[in-house]
Amino acid sequence: MYGAFWRILPGPAWVRFLALVVVLTIVLVSCVTWIFPWIDGIQNTGEGTVGR
């Protein structure tokens, strides 16, 4: 799968590497900013299943 990404990107190796770093950074920032908080809001983490 990563090889396919590498082959479809245009340009020399350093441009491909830079493009992959930028795309991965955008994906990570998007996950931390929107996806993870949305999932945290859906989950019910306030309830414990172990009683005393």
Image (cartoon, rainbow, N blue to C red):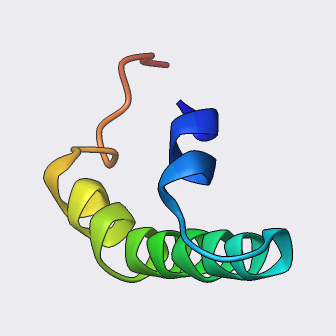
Up the image or down, 19 lies above or below 48; here it is below
Residue 4 spot, x, y in % from top left: 52, 38
Identify the residue shown where x is 23% and y is 45%: 43
Q: In which quarter of the image is residue 39?
A: bottom left
Task: Looking at the picture, tell me which residue is in the foreground, 19 or 9.
Answer: 9
Number of disc labels: 0
**Residue for point 64% across, 69% down:** 20
Q: Which residue lies furthest to the front in this view?
A: 11
Image quadrant of residue 10? bottom right
Q: Which residue lies furthest to the left in this view?
A: 42
Q: Which residue is drawn at 29% across and 77% down?
A: 34
Residue at point 46%, 70% (across, down): 27
Residue closest to the eye, 44 or 9: 9
Give whichever of 25, 6 is nearer the camera.
6
* Coordinates of residue 47 in the picture (x, y in percent): 29, 38
> On screen, 28 above or below 8?
below
Taking 11 as reference, is 5 left or right? left
- When asked about the image quadrant of residue 12, the answer is bottom right
- Whether residue 7 sits left or right of residue 47 in the image: it is right
Image-based side of 8 in relation to 38, left or right? right
- 5, above or below 1, in the image: below
x and y percentages locating residue 52 in the rendered image:
49, 19
